[in-house]
């Protein structure tokens, strides 16, 4: 849900208390508790621009860091890829580091992705 994270209100600092955030926070909890052999190799998440400054996003990033995902955060507007919808969105793409290191295109992926250590 994007409503707790929109830039159109002044309660962004309390996003994790908003009941609409509970499904996302549950996802973070499940990810944190997953065993390494059950982790998704690639995750892609989309939300409103502004989500990246929320407490929920910080929680998400900590869950990814805990399992050694390489992460990219970016804004993308559908018009940039030819879709007639002018609404910028926040995206997070995460790939397990071990998957990247085994990939033939690991150097290119590592240029684009980062490993977050400064949370």
Image (cartoon, rainbow, N blue to C red):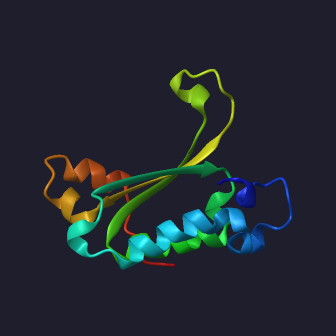
Residue toward you, 113 or 42: 42
Compared to 94, does 58 lie above or below? below
Is residue 57 among what the camera can see? no
Is residue 100 among what the camera can see? yes
Task: Indicate left or right for 58 with 94 as reference.
Answer: right
Coordinates of residue 108 in the picture (x, y in percent):
27, 48
Compared to 116, does 4 lie above or below? above
Coordinates of residue 16 in the picture (x, y in percent):
68, 73
Compared to 104, does 13 lie above or below? below
Q: Residue at x 34, y 66 (%)?
A: 69
Count of numbered badges drawn on the protein: 0
Outermost right residue? 10
Coordinates of residue 46 in the picture (x, y in percent):
54, 49
Q: Quadrant of the N terminus?
A: bottom right
- Quadrant in which residue 7 is drawn: bottom right
Residue toward you, 12 or 74: 12
- Quadrant in which residue 66 is drawn: bottom left
Q: Residue at x 62, y 44 (%)?
A: 89
Q: Residue at x 51, y 78 (%)?
A: 119
Coordinates of residue 19 in the picture (x, y in percent):
71, 67
């Amino acid at each position: 849900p994007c409503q707790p994270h929109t830039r159109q209100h002044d309660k962004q600092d309390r996003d994790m208390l908003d009941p609409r955030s509970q499904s996302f926070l549950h996802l973070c909890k499940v990810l944190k508790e997953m065993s390494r052999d059950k982790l998704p190799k690639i995750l892609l998440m989309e939300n409103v621009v502004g989500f990246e400054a929320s407490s929920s996003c910080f929680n998400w990033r900590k869950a990814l860091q805990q399992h050694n995902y390489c992460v990219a955060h970016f804004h993308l507007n559908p018009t940039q890829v030819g879709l007639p919808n002018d609404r910028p969105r926040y995206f997070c793409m995460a790939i397990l580091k071990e998957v990247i290191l085994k990939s033939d295109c690991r150097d290119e992926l590592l240029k684009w992705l980062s490993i977050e250590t400064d949370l």
